[in-house]
Image (cartoon, rainbow, N blue to C red):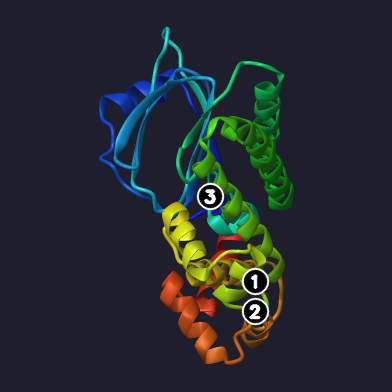
Amino acid sequence: MNQLFQIFKVDNQLATKISAAPDAPHNHDFEELIIAIEGKLEHFIDFKTTVLEAPLVSFVTKGKVHRVIPKLKDGNCDMWVMRFKSEFIPETTFQLYASFHNHASLKFSCNDNFNRLLTICGFINEEMKQEVPDFSVVKQLLSTLFVMIESENNKSTKGLNGMAKTKNTTMQNFLQILEENYHRPLGVDFYAQKLFMSARNLNLICNNILHQSVSELIETRKLIEAKNQLIHSDKNIAEIGFELGYADKAYFTTVFKKKTGQTPTEFREEMKNLLS
């Protein structure tokens, strides 16, 4: 995907076309949000297949192997699909990884809460139809949309068993502490102490939920902020790296390229071209 954000509708015709010749399971370099109003969604993810009927919300994080097949129900299919680069709403996306780690879809009732989501989708679509869309408006609307989805998602976790609920709570608390401290030169022990647990147990929980160690998550969060600064500020590479705890510009560039496949300068230029 060579755009920061895109939105489109899956209607009866497109759903029929996709169902007739579905893709093989795959992953992609963007995040995908599907809000299904009518129809069914056959979703292969985490090596199992589920079929859910609308209304529902499905979120697939970048890199997850999956396959989505929209299907008609009672002759109808109507779904909003939004695709966006992680750096479009970096802080929100990072938090979402913890919330959707063990399930991709959230079932909704056809009520006022769900209709509010559709209203925001309509606002986003209208903005994207403008001759020159204001991406700051789209970004705020998308963030609001996820906050509302997250609110419903939190209600659904009430049925988790004690151990799973504890792990989810620990993960959320860790991410909150990380959000406040990622720019500081702090290691695993600091976060473990804040959570009153051993570094080993915190690493086990992070690996179980997000498949990354604590150190990897700290570095991931730093790089998300680096991308944010590269897109939205005029700071030079060395300054951005220093603010995130990288004293040496060359080391910051090496870490950035290892994780993203691009140097900070190459990334900045690519994003400028996409935004223009």
Mark 2 crowdedness (10 Å alpha carbons): few <14, some 14-19, many ≥20:
some
Is the residue 106 above or below the residue 205 in the image?
above
Task: Give the image location of residue 128, x and y in percent.
Answer: 64, 41
Q: Position of residue 145 (x, y in %)?
A: 67, 38
For the C terminus, the quadrant is: bottom right
Position above or below: 56 against 198: above
Q: Residues within 10 Å of mark 3 (few under 14, many from 20)?
A: some
The spot of residue 230 in percent (x, y) is 63, 72
Q: Secondary structure at mark 3?
A: helix
Pointers 3 and 2 in contact (C-beta within 8 Å): no
Q: Which of pointers 3 and 2 indicates the residue nearer the eye?
A: 3
Query: Does dot 2 land on a helix, a strand or a loop?
Result: loop
> Callout 1: helix, strand or loop?
loop
- Residue tagged 3: 167
- Rendered image: mark on residue 80: none
Q: Nearer the viewer, residue 53 or 79?
A: 53
Marks 2 and 1, how far apart in space? 8 Å
